[in-house]
Structure formats: structure tokens, C-alpha cells
Image (tube, rainbow, N blue to C red):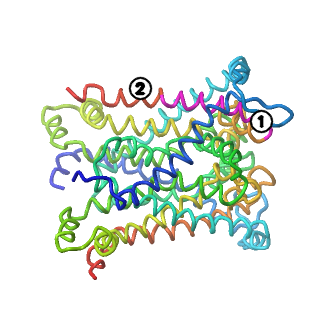
Amino acid sequence: MRRPVSLYGLTFSLPLLIWQLLFFVFPLVFLVALSFWTVRNFRLEAGFDTVNWVTMFGRPVFWQAYATTLAMAAGAAALTSALAFPCAYAIAFKLSPAARRWAVFLMVIPFFTSYLVRVYSWQVFLSDVGIINVMLGWIGLGPFRLLNTIGATMLGYMTLGFPLVVLLQLFSLVFVDRTLIEAAHNMRCGRLRTVFAVVIPSARVGLVIAALFSFILCFGDFVSPIYLGGGDPTTLSILITDTTKSGQQWPRAAVIALTMIATLMVVAFLAVRFAYKGRTK
Amino acid sequence: MNEQNELNRNPLIDAALKLYVILAYLFVFAPILASFVFSFNSDRFPSIPLGHFSTEWYRAVAADPLVWEGLRNTLGVGAAVGMISTALGFGAAYTDYRYRFFGKQVYLALALLPPTIPVVIMGLAMLAYLSRIDLSGNALSVIIAHVVICAPFAMAVIRLRLSQMDPSLEPAAWNLGASEWATMRHVIIPFTRPAILGALFITMAVSFDEFAIAWFVSGLNETLPVKVLGFLQGQVSPRINAIGTFVFVTSMTLVILAQLLLSGRGPATDKE
């Protein structure tokens, strides 16, 4: 249906385009300009000065936070994917269609509950006099320091990513050709081997995309590292909020944000390439 | 499913997998349920054993004028965000459904990418940009920022509905002499109405729970989730649970309404 540009067509297509250009593209582009501006006497001054880049990249703290964030987000993506897979697998292959619909519905609910409230709830579980330590006390163990640890941050990351990863894995698993699995079984391929040699390769795109989303979510999250991890070790997201909120150093925060975007783009590119590797043959 | 017998060979492994699924859902719902339970618990520092049943946190929340102000902001922002993002999302979905044009990939990327950008980065970019054009620090800035991330959801929901429409319906109306505008009004909008309402509720629910971007740009006009973030930073108190339970019930009501509309007897109710 190729038609000349009409007022009618533009009425529907232009509003979103204009809105996203004005309030999505421009802010991100402005971030680039901002990273070259300077702050003097608590006031932003436009200009072109690489001082923010030099300052931030010259700080060991920044690179430490960078390495920490990258490692923790990657760890969380791997852990979440590994723990979500048996769940998604069982929902896809072991449940009746009705039960599967319920499982999907229940997994959607967390998206509409406040992440903050869930994180606060984990504090109640993990604190020194919290639910888990009280229960451990009943069998004569503990109390252990559970809150303000990397483990607690990981738990928060899982809270954030687990439902989405299960759903994305599930949607790729239900499309796995079941005759392939039957064929593997008929040829006396073992259970685990079928999973690793048939199911996972067939569902690779979905599994990789799921892990990628988990990575993106955790990479930018500042709530779990602060309120469950205790702010130590510092992540890039904590660095951004601190630099913006207390330091008023927006140009430096922009440097961190742009570094994060660049990293995410590289990771996303690599992940997508890996996901579709050999697909076009 | 007929192949299930073939696939389900070892009942022990099946049982273990099903147990694992139950454990996974327990993990997902433990914090949600705990928040609900402790919102009715009397203890200042929630833990087990439970104290006695109490509604004092709800009363404390209800007596806090700042919470009411936050709620007003949240509802106002949510309503505006819902309507604007649904309108923009509808336009984009219809564009994608009907037109093919040069640069459509870019258009669709712009329409769908925003939710994948980490919220801290969006928050910072929005704060810096909106304060530059004197739009930051008020409810309007939260609306602007939320529409950016909500419109893609509206578009996805409405696009899905449009793909269920018979593609010859629109040309048929034209052949019968209806103008494009009349066809839009009498054919397309009635057909997509459930999705439009569904998108409205879903985008409102997304806006209700969004706290990070709102925290960056809202200034003094904090929404309720930003208030919760404040509680979390300051005196941690079970009030969070009371607010959380309230917001949960509100969001779930919206989502279930959307679900009923979307799955519901769509075409049947659309007959004029």
C-alpha cells in the first residue's frame, strides 16, 4: 500500500516521532554535549572541555566501580539464566496448557508490584534479626550477616530479572520443535544430553536475549546495590546518583552515563551476534 | 498434548522439576506476600514471630499529608501519562500496520527502544535536558519522561490487536465510499477499543510504579513511589508495606481490567 504522504497519515505517525525526538533522542544527545561542559560556582557553563572525561577516567574509583558493575551484572545474568532455565523448561514441557497459562499470568504479576517494596521486603528477611536469622536461630545457628553483602545484592538483582528471564526463556522454549526432542529420545539420546544438545541450541536466541535483558536491568539498577548491598562495593549506578544528587556534578555523571551506554551497546551487539551466529546459513 | 507421554518418561524427574517450579514461584512471591502480611503486623521492626494484627501502619499512612500529596501527584501523572502514551502509541501502531516507508526501521526503533535504556541514565538525561528548557522539577516533567517509556507498551498492545484485524476491512470501507477519517472512526477505533483501553490501564500501571526517573526529575512534586524511596532512605518503617500493598492492589486492578478487555469477547462487543 504505497501512497503519497497525506495529512491523514502524518496525523497518526508524527506525534510519536516528535515526542521521542524531543524527549528521548535530544536528551541523550544533550548528554554528550553536557559531558564537555564545566561546573563553576555551582553553575553549568557551556563549552568544550574534556576535563570531565580526563578526571573521571583518571580515577581508580571509577574503574573499580566499572569492573564491579560489569562483573556483578554479568554474574547476575548468568546466575538468573541458570536458575530460571529449569523453571522455564518445566513450565514449557511438563505442565498442561491450562497450568502453563496460569504460570505465565503469575509471572507477570511481579512487573506490576513495586520493586522498591520488594527490596524493602527482602531487608525484612535478611536483617540481623530478620526472618531468616530467626529461623536459623531455632536450629541453633547464626545470626549471620546477610544484609549489606554481595549475596544480598545478587538476590535483589534476581528479584528484578528472574520473572522476565523465565518468561523470555519460556517463549523461546515453547517454540522448540518437539519432533526434534522425540527424535533425540528415539535415538537413545540421554535426558540431560537432549537438553544440552537439542533444546538449548534450538532456543538459543531466546535464552541469550533473556540473559541480555537481565544484564541490562542489573547494570543500571541502583536500588539493590544500595539498599541490599549497603552501597559497598560501589557500582556505576550509585556513582551516577551520588554525582547527580549530592555532588551537582552533572557533566561528570554524564561521562559515567555515556560510558554505561557504550558498554551496553557493545554487550548488546555481541550478545545478538552470538544469538544469531550461524542462523543465516 | 499427545507427545507428552513420550516426553514424560521419568516421574521422579518430573516431580523434581515441578517442585522446582513451586520453589521458583515462592522466591518470586515471598517478598510480595511478606509485604502484605507485615503491613497488618504491629511490630515496628518486622520479623517473626508476628506481633498482633493491626492497621496502625495504614492509619499512619492515611494521616500523613505528604503521602496524600504523593498519591495525588501519582494519580494525576498516571492519568495524563496513560492518555498521552495511548494516543501516541495508537498512532505509531497504526502507522506500522498501514504504511511502509523509507526509514521505518528507525521509526520503529524510536518507538520501541526507550524502555531498554537504564532508568538512571534516562533520569539523568531527562533532568539535565528538561532543566535546560525550564521544564524540570514539576509534575509536567514526570509526565513527559513517563510518556517516553510508556508509549512503547501502548504501541505493542495496540499493534497486537491491529494484527488480528482482517486487512481487507479498511479497504472495504473505502470502497463503500467512506473517507479515511470516517473509516478510522467507524471501523478501526471500534475494533481496537479493547486494546486502547487495555493500553491505557497498562501504561497507567507502569507509571504508578516508576520511581527512578520520577526521582530525578520530579523536584518537590514527588510521586508516591518516590516517597517510598524516601522512606527507604530515611526511617525505614512498615509504612512502606502499607503503601506497597495499596499500590499493588491498584496496579493489579488496572492490569486485570486490561486483561479482561484484551482477552474478552473482543469482536463480539465491537458490533455497532
**Callout 1 touching callout 2 (CB < 8 Å):** no
The residue stretch that appears in magenta: A246-265
Q: Quadrant of residue A54?
A: top right
* Drawn side of residue B106 relative to residue A141, left or right: left
Secondary structure at numbered mark 2 = helix
* Drawn side of residue B244 relative to residue B54, left or right: left
Q: CA distance from mark 1 to mark 2?
A: 37 Å
> Percent position (x, y) of residue B242?
68, 66
Looking at the figure, which quarter contains the C terminus of chain B? bottom left
> Percent position (x, y) of residue B79?
57, 68
- Asked whether A194 or A77 is in front, the reply is A77
Magenta stretch: dominant SS? helix
Q: Magenta segment: does it hold A249?
A: yes
Secondary structure at numbered mark 1 = strand
Residue kind at label 1, given as amino acid type = Leu
Residue A137 visible here: no
Q: Quadrant of residue A186?
A: top left
> Percent position (x, y) of residue A113?
56, 58
Q: Quadrant of residue B74?
A: bottom right
- Indicate whether B220 appears above or below A237: below
Number of numbered markers = 2
- Indicate whether A34 appears above or below B251: above
- The residue singled out by tag 1 in the image is A44
- The residue singled out by tag 2 in the image is A270
Q: Magenta segment: does it hold B208?
A: no
Q: Which chain does tag 2 point to?
A: A
Identified at 19% across, 31% down, the residue is A189
> Percent position (x, y) of residue A93?
28, 48
Q: Where residue A202 is drawn, which disc sits there?
A: none
Neighbours of disc 1 within 10 Å: few (<14), some (14-19), many (20+): some
Looking at the figure, which quarter contains the N terminus of chain B? bottom left
Identified at 21% across, 45% down, the residue is B7
